[in-house]
Image (cartoon, helix red, strand yellow):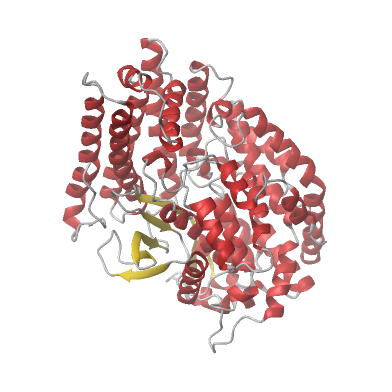
Amino acid sequence: MAPSAFPTAFPTDAAGWLPYLAEAVDGGLARTRELLDRLKDGTERSTDDVLALWNDAAVVHGGASALAHLLSEVHPDADVRAAAEEGAQASEDLATERSLDVDLRRVLDGTSADGLDSKAARVREHALRDFRRAGVDRSDEEREELRELARRCTELGLEFSRAIREGTRSIRVEAARLAGLPEDFVEAHPADEDGLVTLTTEYPDLVPVRTYATDAGVRRELMTEYLRLAWPENEAVLAELLRLRARRAELLGYPDWPTYEVETRMIGSGAAVAEFIERLDALTAEPAAADVQVLLERARQDDPTLEAITPADSLFYDAAIRRERFDVDPQALRPYFRWEAVKEGVLSTMCRLFGLALRPVQVQTWHEDVDVYDVVDDGTVIGRVYLDMHPRAGKYNHAAQFPLVPGIAGRQLPEGVLVCNFPTGLMEHDDVLTFFHEIGHLLHEIVGGGQAWAEQTGVATEWDFVEAPSQLLEEWGWDVGVLQGFATNETGEPIPADLVERMRTADAFGRGAWTRRQLNFTALSYGLHANPPADLDAFTAQVDEHYGPFAPIPGTHQYAGFGHLDGYGSAYYTYLWSLVIAKDLRTAFGDDLMDPEVGRRYRECILEPGGSADAAELVERFLGRPSSFDAFDAWLAASPR
């Protein structure tokens, strides 16, 4: 195949988007089919030629699929989003067709691993494995059912995500009820002609209200609406999705969906996920209970009748504890974290650490707010990144990295997109940590985008390792030297070192409750899939009862807005599993997070290989030993109470 044009050229006017999608996505899928048909045309080919043609199809398909999924989440025009969603559905359907194609499997099965290098052998091995996992060896009737199940699951997943993305809720309150919120927040939320202020469930409203609003009723009202996102529409969608995933697992000979889903991941088995949950359950139960008791005692100073801490109160009283016990006022931190300075600071920090440079470019994208940079390594452009960082109607409403163009050595440079929902003015420190986290995914996409094989390029490691590099980079958001490089107030004074030290001490408070909350999501994700319940609300209540750590708010339906139940399925455990690894990776940097030698070694050992080797092997290359729980255990035990 000829090298692809770099960079991507987007339409320059609104009328051009639908034709562009038709060519790039529909045309890309048609070209993919042509390449796959060539594989089956009866021509006798060597193993190298078969794998090369297989890879060509994967490259074209990957590009079409990435574009469709991205634009379905970020394009401001609802018609374009809908067309892109149709393209995403078609792309997933094609992937299903490929995996169930008996003739394709026969061609791949006729190849030999003899003489292949390790990366090519890995491609061949994974292709044959994926044919088996798709059910290509089943009867004609079973294959047809599996095909229809996969198609419907994709449709349901897209519907589930769309309902969340487009399901923003809001409340209207009297202006006087904004007491405690930052001045700039209040100024940005003027009262309407009825004297009421609208607050939405989008993060730039939700997080400040939960953290600073002294009116407990406002906090509860907005959090209640947030926990009703996409309900009731997603209740039936999720119930069907869980049922169909269970049926797919049954047809494929697996006891449940988690066992099927994690077979190809680091953890290895559904039973291992359950064991991981049990281990963390025992590890976090007492620390979490102690943390919540501290919050409750403080909350009862305001309301002696309060019986429990709910998610509507947790951030507010966590902030109160930090302010009163550790002399860290989250609101006083905000002037040090101004969006433009944070953006430049985070980007420059990562460039220094990994020996890269970013060159701003002015090009047409899907929205005027998107910033675009070429990534330069030693004078050579190695990829392009897009930063879509602020909320708007119809846009993906969390934070994530989306691939756009898969990098293929000698053929096409990688392009990746960061999609966040940060405020344009003052930020929370948690926003800064999120930025470091997500930039980790973006760097992984670009730096790992020099592989020859489509399935090994960019963020292509096992799914339960993919969060570890990003969770590691959050550590840079706590380093005094790093923060003082960009965290300055309006007069240019850097954030004081003693304040950063107090922030670090305060951050150690509540780790038990935070980890327990993540475990709650993990147990919900796993449990819903291990044995799909007849009553989603009742099962969610059971999980909350056991894992907590906070009391649920009556009348809410958390599962309906739990977007990870689509993309991550049963595997939300990934976040805690990866965190264990991330804490271990951190030990290699010692006292100097900006050590260029360690940064270079990390880039070479962890990021650049993409998915060309098992994640456990990459970690061992970097650390010089297998990963362990020791650093995570020490981190969790450091929580002061």
Q: Is residue 86 visible?
A: no
Seen in the picture, residue 64 relative to 272 is either above or below; the reply is below
Image coords of residue 574 (percent x, y): 59, 43
Q: Residue furthest bottom?
A: 491
Left or right, 220 with reference to 568: right
Q: Position of residue 479 (x, y in %)?
A: 64, 70
Image position, residue 555 (x, y; %): 61, 44
Taking the view exactly as shown, the residue that stands out farthest to the front is: 115
Q: Looking at the rendering, in which quadrant would you find the N terminus?
A: top left
* Quadrant of the rendered image containing residue 24: top left
Q: Nearer the viewer, residue 391 or 624?
A: 624
Look at the picture and state if 288 lies above or below 565. Answer: below
Please state which of residues 638 and 193 is positioned toward the viewer in this rendering. 638
* Residue 335 on image: x %, y %: 57, 79
Closer-to-camera residue (383/87): 383
Q: Specify the quadrant that holds the C terminus.
A: bottom right
Q: Quadrant of residue 210?
A: bottom right
Location of residue 462 with respect to 135 vertically, above or below: below
